Amino acid sequence: MKNPDIFRLITSPPVEKQGSGEDEANIKDIMSFDFSEGFEDKVLARINSGIEVYGRTYAIEKSFSLAFYRIAFTAAAAVVILLLSIYLKEGSFSFDLLLGIGDIDSESIVCLLTGN
Amino acid sequence: MVISSYRESGDDILVKATLEGDQNAFREIVSRYRKMVARTVKGMLGDTVYSEDIGQEVFIKLYHSLQEFRGEAKLSTYIQKIAVNLTLNEIKRRKRFFSMFTHKGSDELYEYDVADDDYAGKNDVRELVSKALMQIDPKFRSIVVMRMLQGYSTKETSEILSLPVGTVLSRLSRAQEQLREILKNQK
């Protein structure tokens, strides 16, 4: 079957029972897939070994995902606590206060940076 | 009752024997439906190493839930429901996971997997259709796979996906529109 034929079948308007049986068989034949050899044995081995449905590959990804959310949540909580403590201590917000240089005047900063 | 070969047995006998603890009966169920599950899982996920894992999980879940199977629907329909649900969950899970660490969508990553696999070049038409399927929305993809690749009727598709018939028809129409657009340059 040439490309245009299978493309036509796949994209043809929906009709009940998908056209002729021959067309159906053609699509099924071309789009046939299978698992690797010994698939039955692998399934039974997993059933008998009692490995949970979400296997090891997923356990690693799952723990990554969980760690990511925990770190993100902790970081967000730390930022909120920092902002709250600044506000309670200083009574206002400013960029300097966030940087921790709210009570240093510009001359002191120049001295600090140049050493003079 | 000891049955050496279940090849000729009906699904009901296989289910009953599995529930009685005969793993040979379940092996026959896996053997009978593995290609059907592969078409659903690989049709929706692409031909990747993950598809094999999901395929195994479909049958493991079936094994553990066989007691709930009352035989009102066909066993194949019951297996398809499990396959579609697990595959859609996997697509969502991977999308969520990859969106945290990369700007690429999970489907783009699947495409690289497809190219890496021995799948590439094996069957050009199948590869082109698979790649086109990977580019459409998973909820549309599941309908195309059920309706066009598996050959289920609209009603059967609506039962497997637990969707109204009207939704199946409208999604199929939109999916085919998208596929037409994607495939028009491939002819």
Image (tube, coloured by chain):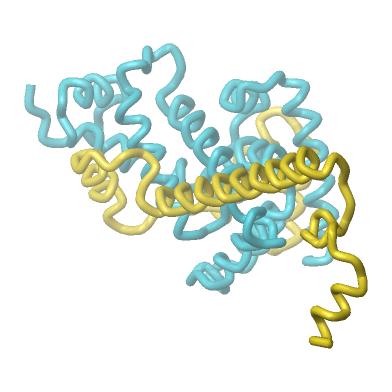
Chain colours: A yellow, B cyan
Q: Residue A36 falls in which quadrant of the image?
A: bottom left
Q: State the residue in front, A63 or A44.
A: A63
Of all residues, the one furthest to the front in this rendering is: A116
From this viewpoint, is residue A86 visible? yes
The residue at 86%/59% (across/down) is: A96
Q: Quadrant of the N terminus of chain A?
A: bottom right
Q: Residue A24's quadrant in the figure?
A: top right
Residue B35 is left or right of residue B26, and the answer is right
Front one among B3 and B166: B166
Spot the residue most to the left: B2
> Residue B120 appears at what percent x and percent y?
56, 71
Looking at the image, which residue is at 27% across and 42% down?
A: A51
Query: Looking at the image, can residue B43 be seen?
Result: no
A91 and B174: which is toward the camera: A91
Q: Nearer the viewer, residue B131 or B14?
A: B131
B5 sits left or right of B157 in the view: left
Quadrant (top left/top right/bottom left/bottom right) for the C terminus of chain A: bottom right
When the figure is inspected, residue B47 is found, relative to residue B119, above or below; the finding is above
Q: Residue at x 37, y 12 (%)?
A: B70
Quarter where residue B69 is shown = top left
